[in-house]
């Protein structure tokens, strides 16, 4: 069972900022990157995933959700023709992650399949300035008294504290920095999928887990404020609605509730398109809804691409 | 299916840009190989599932990284669509047979063929590849086989007769560029060598190349409106790479005619042509984090395939 975003914030000692950070916004607004021309391609990719991909009438979510992801990533990857440093990225599927930490004498652990992880040879530079990081000292974490924040979490006996990014990759792996996690809610049945709020909480917990494991690998296990914050991004989707997240780990000192906090920027519930009509809707011999993709939102695609390019361009 | 087997690989396409950096491409290929066979910690594969565990993901990584990195040199790749696990189908008539049982006994029927293919990956593009030889070329004779197609395991069961290139007709990427086929575990080289059938190893690669490419090019031609009574006015060219994860064989197919039914084939001098290489290893062995015996020749052939494009681009 997954807690909501507010609970996840308490568990990871994180302050929330609405919207995407200025660095990512800057990439979206940069005309030199030619994001306008890619809109047409992105629209084709949506049509391919939702309409054209199968000999049957319409593909199911289990097929079109991963297909849409692969298509969008394909467009992003093709940018390495223009920006060769983008080829220093590698996608890994089915990575397992485990990270352990203590919050106010409660031992917490994030464990499981991270979904799809994109790794990079170079880390993403911090997105918040030193002043913003220091300002988090003033921020007071929301508590849920009298409800314990660990309600809904599974209580397990942890005998072995597992804690490494090397959990998923052996030493010497050249693409050693986790860049972006992708979560695809592709179950056909709606109740098998995470609701947007739960999905965002999951994205935050796993981004935190990956960042924490990386920070411990780089700077050791002692809790401290990080000189070089670790940035990990998350993107979640059900094939139509997108959740975008940038997480910055500023401190591994997580026991107390004061001091420097971590930061997360969330841009939620962004639709890539309004509807995908496979067969035209006809009422009284008049076509009321033509076949095709309607209500395409290019901004959502631009955000996806900007997060992909972040850190390299 | 019919086409003569042949000798050498086609000429590389002329490009104005200087030669791509083979060292860079080699390191991308090795990174992909090492990630899937060594760096990413995975559970041990189940029995006979080696292909899904290592070779499949490796092929996907290899093609996606190489294609993106070469997209700067080949505008056709930059406009391409990448399909993962697509379906390709083609249905045609060829030859005659007499109905044996039932109320139609004694009547003459065309023999029906259906190919239902499932390549591991394919690249589709919006413009056709250039012809290799002129439409009416005659490079050899076609062997004649007398027995029914259901004697071959390929044509035993025909459930649904359909024609599909991997995407519906509305898709602008309606021409095929390159397919990538992964041989299943049960056709491993070691098995052939153990059964002392070494001469059959190349047969597997060739038959896969010919059948898959015929189905793909013929389906593309049908999408453009040609059929056995309205034969193609220009040749349809596509490429394929057949591999078991280590050994690679390259094929190039030119479809010159769709007129294969017993009426239309009578005065049809045109023949379809397939060129192919023998299978060669990309590397010798992977030991820990080192790839030993990497074969640049195979990589170069793959690069040439990916760089193929019409002369005007």
Image: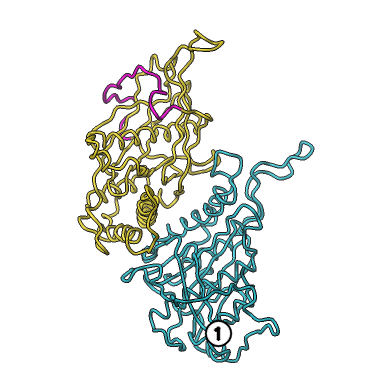
Q: Is residue B74 visible?
A: no
Query: Chain A drawn in what color?
Result: cyan
**Is residue A220 covered in magenta?**
no
Q: Quadrant of the N terminus of chain A?
A: bottom right
Position of A285 compared to B105: left or right?
A: right
Judging depth in this view, the residue of B157 and A180 nearest the camera is: B157
**Which of the 4 quarters of the picture holds residue A186?**
bottom right
Position of B107 compared to B257: left or right?
A: right
Position of B5 compared to A70: left or right?
A: left
Could you say where residue A104 lies in the image, as x and y percent from the top left? 57, 87
Q: Secondary structure at mark 1?
A: strand
Q: Which residue is mark 1?
A: A103
Our reading of the magenta stretch's main secondary structure is: loop
Which residue is painted at 50% across and 70% down in the image?
A111
Relative to residue B85, is residue B27 depicted above or below? below
Name the residue furthest left: B293
Could you say where residue A281 lies in the image, as x and y percent from the top left? 72, 42
Q: Which residues are magenta?
A: B132-156
Query: Chain B drawn in what color?
Result: yellow
């Amino acid at each position: 069972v997954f807690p909501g975003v507010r609970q996840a914030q308490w568990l990871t000692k994180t302050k929330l900022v609405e919207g995407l950070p200025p660095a990512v916004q800057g990439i979206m607004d940069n005309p030199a990157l030619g994001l306008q021309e890619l809109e047409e391609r992105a629209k084709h990719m949506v049509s391919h995933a939702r309409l054209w991909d199968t000999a049957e009438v319409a593909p199911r979510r289990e097929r079109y959700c991963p297909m849409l992801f692969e298509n969008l990533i394909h467009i992003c990857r093709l940018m390495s023709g223009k920006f060769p440093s983008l080829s220093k990225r590698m996608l890994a599927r089915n990575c397992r992650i485990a990270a352990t930490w203590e919050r106010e004498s409660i031992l917490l652990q994030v464990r499981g399949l991270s979904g799809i992880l994109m790794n990079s040879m170079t880390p993403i530079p911090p997105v918040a300035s030193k002043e913003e990081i220091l300002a988090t000292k003033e921020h007071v974490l929301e508590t849920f008294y009298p409800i314990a924040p660990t309600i809904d979490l599974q209580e397990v006996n942890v005998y072995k504290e597992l804690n490494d990014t090397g959990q998923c990759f052996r030493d010497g792996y050249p693409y050693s920095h986790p860049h972006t996690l992708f979560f695809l809610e592709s179950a056909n049945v709606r109740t098998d999928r995470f609701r947007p709020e739960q999905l965002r909480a999951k994205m935050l917990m796993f981004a935190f887990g990956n960042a924490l494991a990386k920070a411990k690998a780089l700077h050791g296990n002692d809790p401290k404020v990080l000189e070089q914050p670790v940035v990990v991004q998350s993107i979640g989707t059900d094939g139509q609605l997108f959740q975008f997240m940038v997480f910055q780990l500023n401190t591994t000192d997580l026991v107390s509730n004061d001091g420097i906090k971590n930061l997360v920027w969330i841009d939620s519930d962004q639709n890539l398109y309004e509807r995908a009509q496979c067969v035209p809707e006809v009422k009284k011999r008049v076509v009321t809804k033509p076949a095709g993709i309607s209500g395409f939102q290019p901004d959502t695609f631009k955000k996806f691409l900007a997060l992909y390019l972040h850190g390299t361009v | 299916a019919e086409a003569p087997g042949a000798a050498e690989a086609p000429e590389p396409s002329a490009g104005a840009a200087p030669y791509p950096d083979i060292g860079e491409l080699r390191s991308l290929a090795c990174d992909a190989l090492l990630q899937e066979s060594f760096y990413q910690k995975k559970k041990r594969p189940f029995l006979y599932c080696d292909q899904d565990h290592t070779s499949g993901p490796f092929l996907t990584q290899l093609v996606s990284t190489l294609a993106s990195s070469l997209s700067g040199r080949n505008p056709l790749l930059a406009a391409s669509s990448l399909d993962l696990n697509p379906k390709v189908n083609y249905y045609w008539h060829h030859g005659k047979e007499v109905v044996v049982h039932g109320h139609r006994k004694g009547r003459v029927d065309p023999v029906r063929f259906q190919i239902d293919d499932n390549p591991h990956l394919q690249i589709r593009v919006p413009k056709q590849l250039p012809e290799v030889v002129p439409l009416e070329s005659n490079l050899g004779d076609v062997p004649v086989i007398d027995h029914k197609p259901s004697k071959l395991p390929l044509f035993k069961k025909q459930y649904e007769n359909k024609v599909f290139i991997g995407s519906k007709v509305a898709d602008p990427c309606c021409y095929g560029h390159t397919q990538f086929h992964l041989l299943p575990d049960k056709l491993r080289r070691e098995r052939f060598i153990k059964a002392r059938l070494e001469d059959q190893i190349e047969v597997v690669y060739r038959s896969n190349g010919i059948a898959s490419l015929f189905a793909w090019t013929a389906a593309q031609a049908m999408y453009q409106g040609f059929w056995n009574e309205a034969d193609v006015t220009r040749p349809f060219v596509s490429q394929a790479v057949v591999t078991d994860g280590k050994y690679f064989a390259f094929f190039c197919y030119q479809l010159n005619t769709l007129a294969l039914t017993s009426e239309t084939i009578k005065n049809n001098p045109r023949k379809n042509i397939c060129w192919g290489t023998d299978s060669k290893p990309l590397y010798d062995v992977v030991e820990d984090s080192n790839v030993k015996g990497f074969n640049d020749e195979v990589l170069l052939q793959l690069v040439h395939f990916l760089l193929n494009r019409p002369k005007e681009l």
